Amino acid sequence: MPPRGRRSLYVAVVAVLAALHIVLSYAPPLVGFRRMSIAIEPLEGIIAGPYLGFLSAVIGWIGGRFVRPDGIWIENLFGIAEAIGALGAGFLVTRKWYLTAGLYAFLLLGFLIHPLAGKIPLWTLWDTDLGLAAIFPAAFLLRRLSDVKSSASYLVPVIALVAFASVELDSMVRIFMLTVAGLYRVYPIPVDLLAGTICPRRVSDSRGGGI
């Protein structure tokens, strides 16, 4: 168990990040269908690490949906993807890139072996495929950050790659929930329209919400 002062720091970090998550979740949706809270999830993992980052994102997800719930009740469940995105970013910055890659592989494989995969063109997942690919250069550059002389030049691309991989992991979780977990039936969404739902991956309600 960490010392009392360290525990207080952990609590403060989680509280601040969760509060920011809630505030951004309450902000106007990003490009019409994604909450602004996706902007904080990579930072939750980068700043707080995988587990505390996950915790702050869970609190932010629940708090944000409590303050501003989505019009369609099932869409509130998709907020767990924000916590998974923060977890993936945390694993990356703690040099456990293989765990982030494993999360991606599990979700992608689950999608590919599902019967719906045959009805959804793979091009609709092009951005999530790039997110998976971004893990490997991010892991390589993170190893180079141990070199003090070159750390400054690598910092910006590392943060960009980690953030991109984190947000795309979030997207992959939403796709998995929508298709493999069968949540598309709740809306309901005809199977023929699923490809258009995944790209640009939204099911918008009258309030401008979405998964």
Image: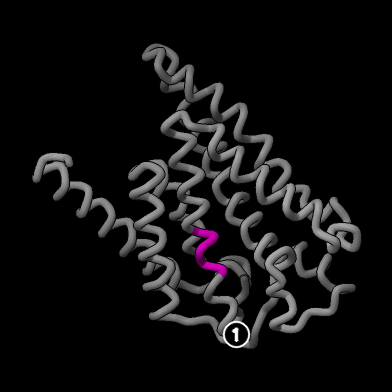
Residue 172 is situated, as x and y percent measured from the top left of the image, at 66, 54
Taking the spot 39% from the left edge, 80% from the top edge, the residue there is: 67
Residue 12 is situated, as x and y percent measured from the top left of the image, at 20, 54
Q: Is residue 146 left or right of residue 208?
A: left
Q: Magenta segment, which residues? A: 78-82
Residue 150, above or below 175:
above
Q: In the rendered image, which quarter contains the N terminus?
A: top left
Disc 1 marks which residue? Answer: 72
Which kind of residue does numbered mark 1 sit on? Ile
* Quadrant position of residue 65: bottom left
Q: Is residue 70 left or right of residue 49?
A: right
Taking the spot 21% from the left edge, 54% from the top edge, the residue there is: 11
Secondary structure beneath label 1? loop
Q: Is residue 188 left or right of residue 163?
A: right
* Quadrant position of residue 191: bottom right
The image shows a total of numbered marks equal to: 1
Category of crowding for the residue at label 1, using alpha-carbon neighbours closer than 10 angstroms: few (below 14), some (14–19), many (at least 20): some
Q: In the rendered image, which quarter contains the C terminus?
A: bottom right
Residue 168 is situated, as x and y percent measured from the top left of the image, at 62, 50
Residue 152 is situated, as x and y percent measured from the top left of the image, at 42, 22
